[in-house]
Image (cartoon, rainbow, N blue to C red):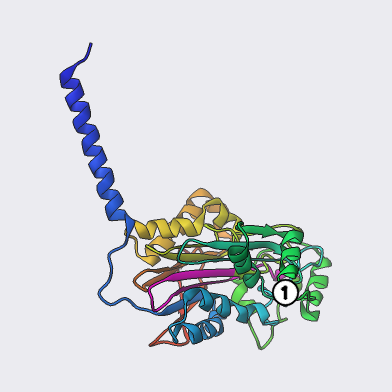
Amino acid sequence: MFNRRKFIKATAISAALFSMGKKSMANGITIPKAKNIKKPIVISTWDFGVAANADAWKILSKSGNALDAVEQGVWVPEADETNQSVGYGGLPDRDGKVTLDACIMDHLGNCGAVLALEHIMHPISVARKVMEKTPHVILAGDGALQFALEQGFKKENLLTPASEKAWKEWLKTAKYNPVINIENKLYDKAAPQKLPGNQYNHDTIGMLALDSNGNLSGACTTSGMAYKLHGRVGDSPIIGAGLYIDNEVGGATSTGVGEEVIRNVGSFLVVELMRQGYSPEDACKEAVMRIIKKKPETAKNIQVGFLALNKNGEYGAYAIQKGFSYAVCDEEKQDLVIKGKSYY
Ligand code: SD4
């Protein structure tokens, strides 16, 4: 039988829930605008982000758009043969092949990615072409190469003598031995080959920019983990894992052991936490804590770092291990390097 009192109670509860839902959606949809939005600004992972930011800044400082800025910015490490973890000169996989992962995302939510792409110096630009010239988001392996060549990219040998030498050294033991913060050690320009071959493992540039129109874009590009299995793809080209942009909220990117970032959809998580009101640093910290909570033993011996920028131009980072650094460039600071906070 129809119970009027029960019906009224149930209706009142659902109305309350509905309005709470609406309220939290309304509150959650954008972060409060700061009075002074810091823009333009560009930030990127690791010390070598300084040189990349400088090229991005050439575009941003002339009121250029964030998408062009991040693409041009990450070209710097992609073309730098002394950087053995991104683009040309990257350390190869177990079979001696340099396979590159990259993705790009703009303020409209458009995105493009290439996975395990060989022979192309600037995978980020192929990722942008995937975004702009195809109805797809991801192209992988041979298909990505075929597309790149059709688009006019040049086929090149990306394995430099230095990286080949390191790989041959590694083959002597062929042990996979991740080293924490190899990124900064690799980027020792004075002695790029100082470390024995079997110690190289991974690195990436993730870059986030807010342009003078208040639009965000991001790019992420890497040769991934050195001596990985052929065909292994990390977090860097996976939208939501290695990079995510939401123009209402902010952007995030990651570096480190990609498997753990993918398992936690790390960059998407950071952006969603910022949507809920977390500061960029607190959002990065919470994403790191998810990784640590799920696999505390694994986390002790690996590095993962997140970097975030919100709509107001505020930024922050957090990593599992000490030693994660990032570079910031805005009107006041052109070559700032910040040591991110860490759990250990
Ligand atoms: C990967 N996340 O392939 C990349 C590597 C990296 O610092 O960022 N290293 O898993």
Relative vertical location of residue 22 with respect to residue 42 in this rendering, above or below: above
Q: Residue at x 19, y 21 (%)?
A: 6
Q: Position of residue 102 (x, y in %)?
A: 62, 66
Looking at the image, the residue that sits furthest to the top is 1
| Res. 227 visible in picture | no
Residue nearer the viewer, 140 or 174: 140
Residue 217 covered by magenta stretch:
yes
Badge 1 marks a residue whose secondary structure is loop
Residue 314 covered by magenta stretch:
no
Q: Residues within 10 Å of mark 1 (few under 14, many from 20)?
A: some
Q: What residue type is disc 1 on? A: Phe
Quadrant where the N terminus sits is: top left
Q: Position of residue 242 (x, y in %)?
A: 55, 62
Q: Is residue 10 left or right of residue 71?
A: left
Q: Quadrant of residue 309?
A: bottom left
Q: Position of residue 272 (x, y in %)?
A: 40, 56
**Tag 1 residue:** 153
Q: State how many labels appear.
A: 1
Q: Residue at x 61, y 82 (%)?
A: 76
Q: Quadrant of residue 134?
A: bottom right
| Res. 41 visible in picture | yes
Relative vertical location of residue 238 with respect to residue 219 in this rendering, above or below: above
Residue nearer the viewer, 1 or 288: 1
Q: Which residues are the magenta region?
A: 198-220
Relative vertical location of residue 130 with respect to residue 3 in this rendering, above or below: below
Q: Position of residue 249 (x, y in %)?
A: 38, 63
Is the CB–ligand 1 distance for label 1 below 8 Å? no
